[in-house]
Image: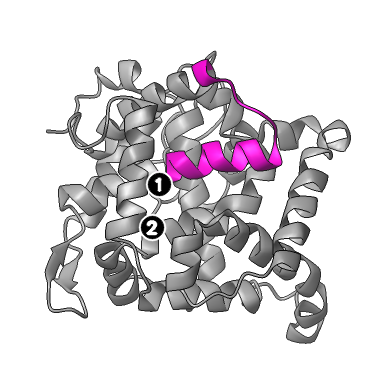
Amino acid sequence: MMPSREEAAELVPPPDGVTWRIAGDARLFAGSGYALLLQVTHPSVGAGVTQHSNFKGDPWGRLLRTLDYTSAMVYGGPDLAWEVGRRIREMHSWIKGVRPDGTRYRALDPRPYAWVHASLAEAIVHGHRLYCGALGGDDVTSFWSEWRRMGQLVGVGKDDLPETWQGLRSYFHDMVERELGRTEAADDVLAALLSPAAPSKPWMPSVVWRVVRMPPAKATWLTTLGMLPGTLRERLGVAWRVDRELRFRMLARMIRLSAPVLPPQARSFGPHYLRWRRGASALSERGSGGGRLHPRTGARPVAPA
């Protein structure tokens, strides 16, 4: 059962909470590929992405829509989060099909639907510890409580995920060992990491993109695969040598040490992103009638579809 608009105020992360503080650090982009791989290695989620998504043709659009969703839910306030949550639920209601193993699936099946929400939380905590800095046990406990509560806004039931972070870790380990594996969508993500498509911008000719993409592509490939559990790397057919592990650890340390030179906008990226996107179609034309700007972030309603 979806919550009412009035209930949304109790479900969104509070501005003085842990989620607001840690989820908007731009250094977490280093783990964005990891979060996506966790999702699409689930056989039902992977099948849904392959059969119903345009990820292969528009990976950058997929990234922006994901950022629209997460930024709106965390930083947009209760009205925006409520609208986005209902739109997300409705958007997934028609996604269904048959997996390659013959199993029928629906995007709203509780297990894969909850896995997407949980895996993003795990990616944020794992990525923050690697690329931003240590998190205390109390911070992680509070973050998971806020994140789990926020899941109700997209229809993740109270009983669909463990109540505690320790329970979440056990659940995550079980999913990695028993359910996640190689899918067509996972292969597409790995291919996009190695050779990312150029943004559809006239000022980015393909010949220029082929040159400028190489350093960030190599770094993203390293940070993504370095975060994966070894079991999952093996299932994806990724060879992970000692030298790659060392480069990954060095890169993670460099990202952590970049904190003193980061501008404030990068340390709290979410609210700034919403203000930037409020003039884009996703945050204005596709919102519910334009909508009022959120007084704290300046965001409009968003349809991350």
Instruction: Work out which quarter of the rendered image holds the C terminus and state it.
Output: bottom left
Label 1 crowd (10 A; few <14 / some 14-19 / many >=20): some
Left or right of 211 in this view: 49: left
The percent coordinates of residue 254 (x first, y second) are 82, 46
Under circle 2, the secondary element is helix
Measure the C-alpha gap from mark 1 to mark 2.
7 Å
Query: Residue 288 or 56: which is nearer the viewer?
Result: 56
Q: Main secondary structure of the magenta part?
A: helix
Q: Residue furthest right?
A: 261
From the top left corner, tell me how far across and down residue 94 is, in percent: 17, 62
What residue sits right under mark 2 in the picture?
39
> Can you tell which mark lies on residue 119?
1
Q: Is residue 59 magenta?
A: no
Q: Position of residue 257 (x, y in %)?
A: 83, 38
Chain-order first, disc 1 or disc 2: 2
Residue at the image position 53 percent from the left and 36 percent from the top: 125
Q: Which residues are magenta?
A: 119-138
Task: Tell whether label 2 touches label 1 (CB within 8 Å).
Answer: yes
Give the total number of marks visible in the rendering.
Answer: 2
- Asked whether 127 falls inside the magenta stretch, the response is yes
| 190 vs 176: above or below | below
**Residue in the picture at 59% in, 43% down:** 127
x then y, percent, for residue 183: 35, 75
